[in-house]
Amino acid sequence: MTAVRPPAWAWVVVAWALLVAGAALIELRWGLELETCLLRRATGVPCPTCGSTRSVLAALRGDFLGSLRASPLLWVAGLGLAGFTAQRLVRGARDAGRPGLRTWQLLLGLALLLANWAWVLAQR
């Protein structure tokens, strides 16, 4: 059986999640506030995923509504990833390579990212 390699975007998501988790851990452990958003630091404009660290911290404190308000994309992505993982476990990798499915997944991910960015900009 051939191993299924994750797509390149999955590695970007993993790196982003590790950055957010690391920043949240540092803030919880040592009380240091980190500005993890390079775009915001450089331009003052928040990036499409701004609020992720605050969302993780709020969830760890048990403030799930505050966590959802800080970054709706984080929750949608988490639920989507759980559903995708469950589907892959049930159906296997049969559908993973279908070009049409990949295109729709990419378009959906881009639409969610842009919607989250609109949310982040509206909350400023």
Image (cartoon, rainbow, N blue to C red):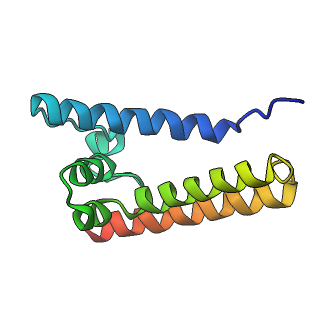
**Quarter of the figure with residue 90:** bottom right
Of 3 and 98, nearer the camera is 3
Question: Which part of the image, by quadrant, shows the N terminus?
Answer: top right
Q: Is residue 60 above or below residue 32?
A: below
Q: Picture coordinates of residue 98 (x, y %)?
A: 87, 54
User: How many marks do you count on the picture?
Assistant: 0
Question: Which part of the image, by quadrant, shows the C terminus?
Answer: bottom left
Residue at the image point whose x is 57% and y is 66% from the top = 111
Q: Picture coordinates of residue 61 (x, y %)?
A: 18, 51
Residue at the image point whose x is 70% and y is 56% from the top = 87
Q: Residue furthest front?
A: 90
Q: Picture coordinates of residue 53 (x, y %)?
A: 29, 45
Q: Is residue 15 above or below residue 89?
A: above
Residue at the image point whose x is 27% and y is 60% from the top = 67
Q: Is residue 114 left or right of residue 55?
A: right
Of 121 and 71, nearer the camera is 71
Residue at the image point whose x is 28% and y is 54% from the top = 55
Q: Picture coordinates of residue 79 (x, y %)?
A: 51, 60
Q: Residue furthest left?
A: 31
Of 3 and 76, nearer the camera is 3
